[in-house]
Image (cartoon, rainbow, N blue to C red):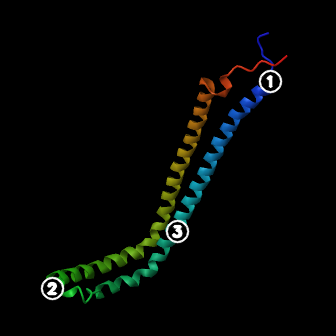
Amino acid sequence: MSERPHTVGQFIVTGESIMLYAISWFVIVLLLAAWSLTAWALHAAAVWTLSSAGALSGAASGVAGLRLPEWLAPWVPAEVVQSLSALLSGLGPMVESLLQAAPALAGGLTWASWAVWGIGGVLFVVLGAALHLLIALWRRGGGPDSRPPRAMAA
């Protein structure tokens, strides 16, 4: 007879390798769930930030009224103060237009979030397949399944 009878020892050893597959895929599913939750939370925070940025558009006009602190004013040359105030007054309208345009960016952010989530999801599935292959190679090349079954005591 070329077939060996199945023993309890063989079943336990085979069960161990099946558990390795199950554990590795369970870890991959947990990582994928954590990745999905993180991507969803970051997307929600970013969309909320962009959609409420339009309400801040009036705040950019107050930038021109900024002054140096009293203790710093004697140490900074007057030319530098004048050039900084001119720069800030020129930046005010540009910042205001960017804040008004920010809510329109929320739609593009959704597509970008889906793309990043999809790339991460594919990488997790590839990682799971690599772990599966590694366990299979380990089983064939010297793992617990490669041992011959123990002889039963008479």
- Viewer-nearest residue: 82 or 104: 82
Q: How many discs appear?
A: 3
Tag 3: amino acid: Ala
Tag 1: amino acid: Thr
Mark on residue 7?
Answer: 1
| Image position of 67 (left or right of 106) | left
Q: Are marks 3 and 1 in contact (CB under 8 Å)?
A: no
Q: Quadrant of the N terminus?
A: top right
How far from the left and from the top, in percent, is residue 17? 68, 33
**Residue depth check, mark 2 versus mark 3: number of the one nearer the observer:** 2
- Residue at image location 80% in from the left, 22% down from the top: 6
Residue 57 sits in quarter: bottom left
Q: Earlier in the sequence, mark 2 or mark 1?
A: 1
Q: CA distance from mark 2 to mark 3?
A: 42 Å
The residue carrying pointer 2 sits among few (fewer than 14), some (14 to 19) or many (20 or more) residues within 10 Å by Cα, namely few
Q: Which residue is mark 3?
A: 45
How far from the left and from the top, in percent, is residue 119? 51, 49
The image shows residue 26, relative to residue 12, as above or below, that is below
Q: Which residue is mark 2?
A: 78
Tag 2: amino acid: Ala
- Viewer-nearest residue: 115 or 133: 133
- Residue at image location 70% in from the left, 38% down from the top: 19
Q: Secondary structure at mark 2?
A: helix
**Residue depth check, mark 2 versus mark 1: number of the one nearer the observer:** 1
Q: Quadrant of the C terminus?
A: top right
The residue carrying pointer 3 sits among few (fewer than 14), some (14 to 19) or many (20 or more) residues within 10 Å by Cα, namely few
